[in-house]
Each structure stands twice: as structure tokens, then as C-alpha cells.
Amino acid sequence: MKYLLGAACVCIFFVQTLQAADKNMPGISPAEDQKSFVEYFSKRFPSVPFQEFGNGIYALDEGQRAQWEEIEQFPPYEFAVDAGKALFETPFANGKSYGSCFENGGIGVRQDYPYFDSGSGQVKTLELAINECRENNGEKKLKYKKGDIAAISAYMAFTSRGELLNVKVPDEPAALAAYQDGMQFYYEKRGQLNFSCADCHVQNAGQNIRADSLSAALGHPTHFPVYRSKWGELGTLHRRFGGCNKNVRATPLDAQSESYRNLEYFLSYMSNGLEINGPGARK
Amino acid sequence: MINKHKKITNNCLIVTVFMTAWLGLCGSAFAQGENMESSYKQTLGLALQANEKVMVLEHQWTTVPVLLKQAEDAAGEKDFARANEFAAEALKHAELGIEQAEQQGQRWVNAVPR
């Protein structure tokens, strides 16, 4: 009996130790992950206030910030926001409009996206929701990388400026799995150059890669969709994911593929608490 | 007269030897071409198989489709030696992508800031 009691105590001790170790494993506790993520960047860039991370590389480089501030005096995305507003307010053939598909008529809701939809067991991004809204109202889907969908998304982001990113990972195995999948994608090396997203935007944030400065991962999703001078137009976050993948010679996935949506889910959760400042202007 | 006959016979012999050698060379070149085509097809099959796998793993390198296209183009020009080289390179890159996916499936956690 004594031995049995002793063995049981040892077992309980081991189980508790394993559970504690599990909680420290990345991906097990999103809240812990986010805390470590923010702390990492706060230590790397102690002079940069938390909210400044939403400004990407312009929070880290004074020279580039000055140029960007001048660009922002006549924002290159302004026309797209106007076009997005017009599209958003134009009724579908059935008389309904985008506003009927979203909470608060779609105004000031950007900060709640992406979210995990327990019904479908999938991550819903804003662009996916826009297209679902169209389909539910008998309209054709829009292409996901640029054009009208970027303009509508830009208008919706514009109406959400100043709201704090508030992405939730519900306590459901499927939601946690989607979050973990996105996290793994972010830290996995890929492509012929063997680079992960994190290699550039976590470990080497603030450094130069050839003539470009690498922005910090913290705050990345707050300013999308974005007008890139390189593109000469507005593009969605998934278009940017594809571009980054191509840069390391990894074949990009389809915009709004499950993996990219999970990636957006993870990345957005990491930036929780930062203000929505989209659409943004970038090089 | 006998000398003339002998000369003709010698000439015939020489021509026959040359013809045989030429036919032999042609035959071997043909056989080599056949071999090259079949080994290209075999390599291409392996490369396509590996490419399918690496795509499922979402770790395809952008070099693979390019190399496969180059292999296809070279085969279209009946240059099976070059086609085989491109297919072999595509296979190598696809296999490296698979290896990368397998390794990173374990190692990504080490890169997470804690």
C-alpha cells in the first residue's frame, strides 16, 4: 500500500511537470506567446513605444519615416478608399449591400478580423467575409489580391482607424490548431534561400537586406491593405505574403488559402492591442 | 587481269568494312538515344512524383516548375541528355524541399522568442 501511494505521488509529480512544460511550449498558450512576442520587440527596440510598431519600418528608421510622413500628406491610397466607399455603398442586384452582412453595418469592424468561425471550423478574414457576402447576395466573387476587394477592405479599415486590434482565439481545439498552424508557418524556413518569415521580421528586424530595411513583425497586419509604391496600387495582406514567399524562392500559396488565413490569424493575434491604421502606404 | 580483280575485291572489302563500322556507329548512337529518352522519362517521373509531394507539404521551391519546364522544352527538341539533366535537377530541388519541410516540422519551435 505504501509503495502504491509512493508510486502515485511520483506519477502526479511527473504529470504536473509535463503539463507545466507543455504550457511553455510555443503555440500551446496564445496569450503567453503574445506576451513573449511583445516583450521581445520591446527589448530589441526599447525606445519605440508599443503603438509605434503599427507604423512598420517607419517606427525604426528616422530617415525613412521622414519620407513616409511626406507621402502621407497626400496619401496615395486616398482614391482607393473613395472607390471602396462607393463600392461598399452600392446595392447588390437584390437591393442589399455589404453593410447587411457585417455587424454595425460593416463600419469600424476591421479590428475583429480575422476571427475563428466555429460553425465552419475555419479562420474568416475580412476579404473572405466580403466575398462570402457577395456570394450570399447572388454576386460573383472578387479576386483576392488587388482591385475592388482591396478597395472595399481599405474603406472598411479606414472606418476602423484608431480601434485596437482584437483578435480572439477561442478555447476550442480547432481554433488553437489554426493558430498553431499559422505560427508554424511563420517560423518555418522555406524556399531555396531557406528563410522563414521570422528570420527577417523577428530575428533581423531593423537590419538591412541589400538596400531594404526589415520591419518588425509586431504591427504588420494593422495597416493592410496597403498601397505599395512598388506595386503602384493597393494590395491585400495575402498578396504581400505571396511576395515574401517568392523573395525566398518558395512558391506562393493561393491568396485566402487555409495556410495563409491561419498565418494571418497568428500574426494578427500577435499584434493585438495595436491601433488599426490601414490602409497604409509603404515602399 | 588478276591484279585488277584483286584490287576490286580489296576495294569492296574496304567499303564493306567502312559500311559495317558506320552502321554499327549509327546503331549504337540510336540505341544511346533510346536509352537517354527512357532514362529522361524515368527521371521526369520521379521528379513529378517528388514535386507533387512537396506541393502538398507547401514547401515547393520556385525553381522546380522552372526546371521541369526546361526539361520539357529540351525533350521537345529531342535533346534528351539535356532534358535528363534538367529533370534530375528538378528532382533534387523537390527532394530538398521535402527534406526542408520534414526538418522544419520539428525545428520551427526553436526560433520562437521565449
Image: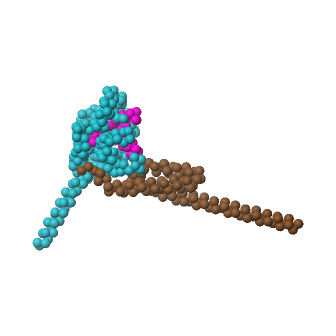
Chain colours: A cyan, B brown
Q: Is residue B20 left or right of residue A245?
A: right
Question: Does the magenta run of residues contain A239?
Answer: yes
Q: Position of residue B102 (x, y in %)?
A: 36, 57
Q: Position of residue B27 (x, y in %)?
A: 66, 61
Q: Position of residue B70 (x, y in %)?
A: 52, 49
All told, the count of numbered labels is 0
Q: Can you see residue A206?
A: yes
Q: Is residue B25 left or right of residue A139?
A: right
* Above/below status of A25 relative to A125: below
* Above/below status of A176 relative to B23: above
Q: Residue at x 24, y 46 (%)?
A: A40
Q: Quadrant of residue A76?
A: top left
Q: Position of residue A193 (x, y in %)?
A: 40, 49
Q: Can you see residue A237?
A: no
Q: Residue at x 77, y 65 (%)?
A: B13
Q: Residue at x 34, y 54 (%)?
A: B104
Instruction: Choose between A210 and B79: the one closer to the eye.
Output: A210
Question: Does the magenta run of residues contain B24?
Answer: no
Which residues lie in the magenta part? A218-247
Which of the image's four quarters has the N terminus of chain A?
Answer: bottom left
Q: Residue at x 11, y 72 (%)?
A: A2
Instruction: Choose between A216 and B2: the one closer to the eye.
Output: B2
